Image (tube, rainbow, N blue to C red):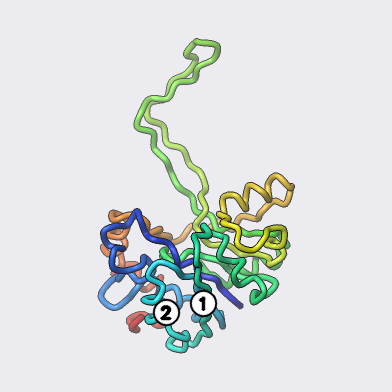
Amino acid sequence: MHAVIMAGGKGVRLRPFTTALPKPLMPIGERHAILGIVLEQLAARGFGSVTLCINHHGPLIHAFVGDGSRWGLEVGYAEETAPLSTAGPLFLVKDRLPEHFLVMNGDLLTDLDYADLLARHRRGGAPLTIATAAQTTRMEFGVLDVVEGRVIGFTEKPAYRHRVSMGIYGMARKTLEPYPPGLALGFDRLIQDLLRQGEFPDSYDFEGVWLDIGRPEEYDEANRRFGELEPALLPVRSGAAA
């Protein structure tokens, strides 16, 4: 099993923390980096190889991970010379990818079973399988139902339940074929293209731990909760340096 980790973002929302460090190397707890936890999890789930797509502070990530032998993984690198958005870096390594592989952001923490997601993707036959989490959005205002200039309904500060992308995907290599190399392509556009073509992605619904560490308050929450979450995030080698 192979995984591609997107680790080239500038971490603009997490400044000033990311001025000196890329987001995947932000420390969590007393002994871990976000990327170290992810690599530990992939190795524990049976993945043998990983490609790291790097750009911002790329040499720091390369120095931290090396060849991956610390985790029992074979790690290779793809370096962007120009911003390629969230899916575009895959074109740099397309010829090295297996028929089906995992793609994920390098700045999140979850106890999702990556191997099960990839296996479900293979069985489903979809061009893309999106890991999804349930989220609740609460409106700060009263919401009006208006028809032809008349208010026919009113709800005070409603809450809406919906599913969101976790930034983790099972992908078929053939899904990349229609796009030219070097294209700056985001997963948002890729999904919209698939929908327009009638090639509907599968959803892998997940209800466990998921922390998207994009903003300072989310990073602080991850550190506050790490003591309780560590056994779930690192069930095999909890306490090992990563």
Helix, strand or loop under label 2: helix
**Residue 77: mark in rendering:** 1
Residue type marked 1: Tyr
Q: Earlier in the sequence, mark 1 or mark 2?
A: 2
Q: In this view, does 98 lie to the left or right of 237?
A: right
Q: Which residue is drawn at 56% across and 56% down?
A: 184
Report the front residue among 229 and 10. Answer: 10
As displayed, is residue 116 above or below residue 66?
Answer: above
Helix, strand or loop under label 1: strand
Q: Where residue 215 sits: x, y (%)? A: 33, 54
Pick the quarter of the image with the N terminus.
bottom right
Pick the quarter of the image with the C terminus.
bottom left
Report the front residue among 208 and 195. Answer: 195
As displayed, is residue 61 above or below residue 8?
Answer: below
**Residue 104: mark in rendering:** none
Q: Distance between the residues labelled 1 and 2?
A: 8 Å
Q: Which residue is drawn at 36% across and 67% down?
A: 22
Q: Residue at x 51, y 85 (%)?
A: 73
As displayed, is residue 81 above or below residue 133?
Answer: below
Q: In this view, does 192 lie to the left or right of 69?
A: right
Residue 98, quarter of picture: bottom right
Q: Confirm or deny contact between disc 1 and disc 2 (CB under 8 A).
A: yes
Q: Where residue 78 sits: x, y (%)? A: 53, 73
Q: In the displayed image of the protein, which residue is found farthest to the front?
A: 81
Residue 34, quarter of picture: bottom left
Residue type marked 2: His
Q: Where residue 84 sits: x, y (%)? A: 53, 60
Q: Is residue 218 left or right of residue 47?
A: left
Residue matched to label 2: 62
Q: Where residue 23 sits: x, y (%)? A: 36, 65
